[in-house]
Image: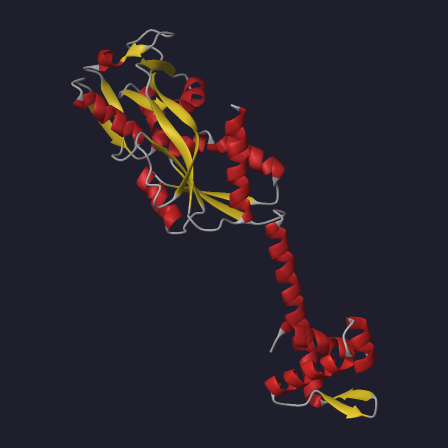
Amino acid sequence: MEIRQLEYFLAIVDHGGFNRAAAALYLAQPSLSQAIQGLERDLGGRLFHRIGRRAVLTEAGQALIEPARAVVRDMELARSSVGAVRELRSGRLDISAMPSQAVEPLSTMMERFAVRHPGVTVSVKAAFTPREVVEQVRSGASELGLVASMRPLPEKEVRVQPVGEQRFVLVTPPDGPFPAGRPVPCERLAGHRVIAGQRGTGMRQYVDELRASGIGLIIAAETEHRVGILPLVLKGVGLAVLTESWKDLAERVGALVLELSPATSLSIALVSRRAELTPAAAAFLALASEDRQRL
């Protein structure tokens, strides 16, 4: 059974016969009759009594009217819904993002996307390491991922679109050990207590590399909860190395944000599967590319 056959059946019912239905459908009458005969074979019963030029519904035909209308309505709704998604009048886009990048640049990206495509809902899923982001995208849990890494991403698994860089900064209490307005040489961090993220994150990798180079940092606390780092800094538990995406928020809550010397950055990229993208994902990537070209 095909949706076309049901549409033809309802046309005959609504127009009162085969000839009028064929004219309304711009279809040859023999083709219409053949389609209805095929429908009757599929259903196992006659739908019309042919009485001269008239077509009278059988009991089976009467019973088919309501379910046929429901099926055709549902198909029209499905076509309309698919068209709305294709034209970005509605739909949903799932993005996996690491915590710092969810603060920025994702908030700015989502702001611009919402202005251009207000009918599309963007759902942000948490991922705490580059590996988690890539895996969520590769497995299809998310269509796009926003990732920060100090090392190249595995482009065999996903497509990678660079969107920028973020420098590391040092966040201290307002009465911390370093003066405002001056970059802090990394070697001056020796002996200071720091709050570190979990292994696998860029901020933890940076701290571990400083320690490996002989700078004697003391890890006072480890946390997966990035939002808990600023309160710990303000309470004097330790200093923190964060990406500059946190700068505005840190300064608003009263922390001191200082540059580090030499400057070190994370590469920020959007990743996607190596498959055809939905219109929403393609539009999001295109918008990010426009932003990067303007910079």
Q: Quadrant of residue 104?
A: top left
Q: Which x, y percent locates residue 258? A: 36, 13
Residue depicted at x 62% and y 56%: 81
Residue depicted at x 67% and y 67%: 73
Q: Which x, y percent locates residue 139? A: 37, 51
Camera-side residue of 154 and 97: 154
Camera-side residue of 192 and 51: 51
Image vertical order of residue 139 relative to residue 125, above or below: below
Instruction: Looking at this view, name the residue that lies furthest to the bottom.
Output: 51
Camera-side residue of 155 and 225: 155
Q: Which x, y percent locates residue 140? A: 41, 51
* Count of marks placed on residues: 0
Camera-side residue of 52 and 92: 52
Image vertical order of residue 263 relative to residue 285, above or below: above
Q: Quadrant of residue 146?
A: top left
The image quadrant where one finds the N terminus is: bottom right
Snapshot colouring: secondary structure
Q: Quadrant of residue 98?
A: top left
Q: Kindly tell me whether residue 228 is visible in this rendering.
A: yes
Residue depicted at x 35% and y 14%: 259
Q: Is residue 236 left or right of residue 6?
A: left
Image vertical order of residue 149 relative to residue 59, above or below: above
Q: Is residue 106 left or right of residue 189?
A: right
Q: Which x, y percent locates residue 281? A: 51, 44
Q: Kindly tell me whether residue 196 is visible in this rendering.
A: no
